[in-house]
Image: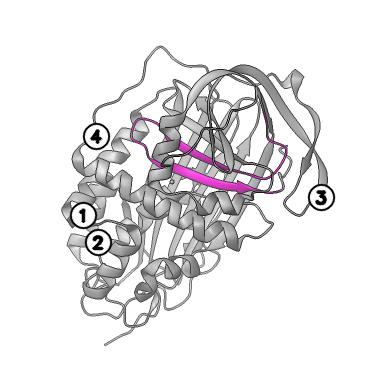
Amino acid sequence: MTRYSALPLPVGLALLASGLVACGEDGPNTRPLTSSERALVSHANDFGFDFLKEIAPTSGDDNCFVSPLSVSMALGMTYNGARNDTEVGMRDALGYGTMSTAEINGAYRGLIDLLVGMDPSVTLTIANSIWYREGFTVEPAFITTNQDSFDAEVSALDFSAASAPGTINDWVKTETNGRIDSIVDQIDPDTIMYLIDAIYFKGTWSSEFDPAKTHDATFETQAGVQKTVRMMTQGAEFPHAARPGYTALALPYGFGLFQMTILLPDAGHTVDEVAAGLDASAWADLQAAMTTSELEVSIPRFELEYERSLVDVLSAMGMQVAFDAGADFSGINPDEDLYIDEVLHKTFVRVDEEGTEAAAVTSVGVNVVSLPPSFVVDRPFLFLIHDQHSGAILFAGKITDPPPAS
């Protein structure tokens, strides 16, 4: 039996922030979620918060930016090939609970269709692809399921050709609107498959910042360094809430279905402490606690590129079996010994006066603390980009030292 030692799973994505065109005449296009879609969003958000809790502390004083939804979808495609203990380990890590495989796939299908067409004033695309070594036999059911459920583009490719990495990277670049140039540097001789998810998001603020009001201001980094940033400022009505250890502000995009929520730790608290306290229940409580009033808001412009391997993170979350030589991916090919060798995640985010653009290859009996009439983001913070209708969290990040936006 030939043994292929790697099933690399690169995951690409990016988040940017230049403005979209103004809202068009068409309004939001929503529908009620099915029970399976609601369950998947709940499980995906649980996974997302667990993922953020693992990522945030390991980044130390550095910034980080991830898309739990992108990771979930790439692994969701791979899950269709997992069997026995590998399937159980991935199911537990991804938080699928008691959902059947058919329910999981159907929910992904419905969620993709809902998210990409929901707000015509926001651009959101979700693209998936599977690239396998020419001559390698892939179970037809694995291909068909991922085509039907994830709209996956499936291609056999001569991995030994010098042009092979460029072919994959061209797809990534196209699907991320040029924000991520590559996900594959070179292809190992043992690599037989890449499964890639790319998410691209671009939205203008419902209430844009006036560039004329952007000014130099001081931001204290997590390392305690005082640095000058370009601070955007505006006064408008925004949803906000105060929770134990932090205050939260929501900045809507377009028709308001998509939002960026900023979590600003109180004095004496860190962003990692705030991240550690987040889960789906705490997130739901925060959304319910939001009230809208006039605020003077100041947030820094920033631009960030982020890249890291996720093998250690996913192993810590219970997926170790998928990375071991004894993994069972017989749903991809029953005659070969396959395991995941790498999960690579790349992101980009730009936040400016017009909005955010993204592309890619989470309380009981608590006293409410009064929120001041101003919300100044002059210290490390968390932020999440999410959909208010379905509740899905698309992106999450930790900014400890805002890189300047060009």
Residue at image x 28%, y 62%?
91
Crowdedness near tag 4: few (<14), some (14–19) or many (≥20) residues, C-alpha within 10 Å: some
Q: Which residue is mark 2?
A: 80
Residue 120: give x, y in percent of width and height: 40, 23
Report the mark closest to the observer, 4 or 3. 3
Helix, strand or loop at label 1? It is: helix
2 and 1 marks in contact (CB < 8 Å)? yes
Q: Residue furthest top?
A: 25
- Please state which amino acid type lies under the numbered disc 1: Thr
Q: Mark 1 and mark 4: span between their CA atoms?
A: 22 Å
Residue at image x 67%, y 45%?
380
Quarter holding the N terminus? Answer: bottom left
Q: Mark 3 and mark 1: span between their CA atoms?
A: 51 Å
Q: Which residue is mark 1?
A: 145
Q: Which residue is mark 4?
A: 33
Assess whether residue 390 is covered by the magenta stretch.
Answer: yes
Crowdedness near tag 2: few (<14), some (14–19) or many (≥20) residues, C-alpha within 10 Å: many
> Up-down: is 311 above or below 260?
below
Residue 346 visible at all: yes
Along the line of sight, the residue nearer the viewer: 326 or 376:
376
> Up-down: is 103 above or below 383?
below
N-terminal of the pair, mark 2 or mark 4, is 4
Helix, strand or loop at label 3? It is: loop
> Up-down: is 248 above or below 90?
above
- Please state which amino acid type lies under the numbered disc 3: Val
- Please state which amino acid type lies under the numbered disc 4: Leu
